[in-house]
Image: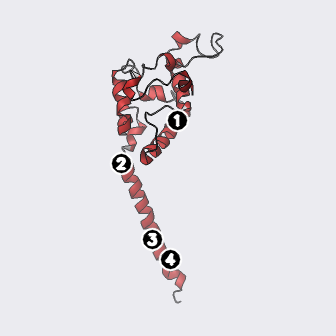
Amino acid sequence: MGETSATKHFPRAWLLLALMAGGALGLGGYTFHYAEGTSYLSTDPKACVNCHIMRPQYDSWQKASHHISAGCVDCHLPASGIEKWIAKADNGYRHSKAFTFQDFPEPIRITPGNAEILQNNCVRCHSDLVHELAPGVGGAQEAVSCVHCHSSVGHGVRAGLGGRDLGIEAEMR
């Protein structure tokens, strides 16, 4: 039987497909290695300074009151369960996109969803002190955001992060 045009080009198509897939995997693997991708699976606060823009937050956290008792993930991610990994994946995607395309605001601001996670973690860790202030506990109708009064707890003085106090309206967004 003679070779047809389709059978002649079939091996070449697979070779081209394999080369393209190998190139994409190689580039992706190199990028993951270069960006220290496995460090983001840990709870080590040093992973947060893989991006140069986070250096002021890391430095100020080292001098702040929670340095001894809480790392980045203790405040900025849900405590456990699938919610923690979903939040970690969401943050990882948004951070890598923002830093790759350089389209993030300066100073960096917490998102509303992450502010809610932060608030929940404050209340969880300090429930014995704030049980009457937390919504739904002790009859309180509305809770004040913990960082409204305690903005310097996690990262030190706000001015050290390159921003000024924007007021209660901006903090509650």
Give the camera-side residue of 167 and 23: 167
Residue 87 has which mark?
1
Mark nearer the N terminus (4 vs 1): 4
Residues at marks 4 and 1, CA–CA distance in whole angstroms: 44 Å
The kind of secondary structure element at disc 3 is: helix
Q: Residue at x 40, y 19 (%)?
A: 66
Which residue carries the number 4 mark? 10
- Residue under pointer 3: 16
Q: Quadrant of residue 15?
A: bottom left
Looking at marks 2 and 4 on the same chain, the residue that comes earlier in the sequence is marked by: 4
Q: Nearer the viewer, residue 154 or 108?
A: 108
What secondary structure is marked by label 2? helix
Q: Are marks 2 and 3 in contact (CB under 8 Å)?
A: no
Q: Is residue 83 above or below residue 167?
A: below
Crowding at dot 2, Cα within 10 Å, few <14 / some 14-19 / many 20+, comes out as few
How far apart in space, not on screen, are marks 2 and 4 (Cα)? 34 Å
Q: Which residue is mark 2?
A: 33
Residue in the image at 41% along x and 62% along y:
22
Query: The disc labelled 3 sits on which kind of residue?
Result: Leu
- The residue lying at 49 percent from left, 16 percent from top is 149
Residue 35 location (% of width, % of height):
37, 45
Secondary structure of residue under mark 4: helix
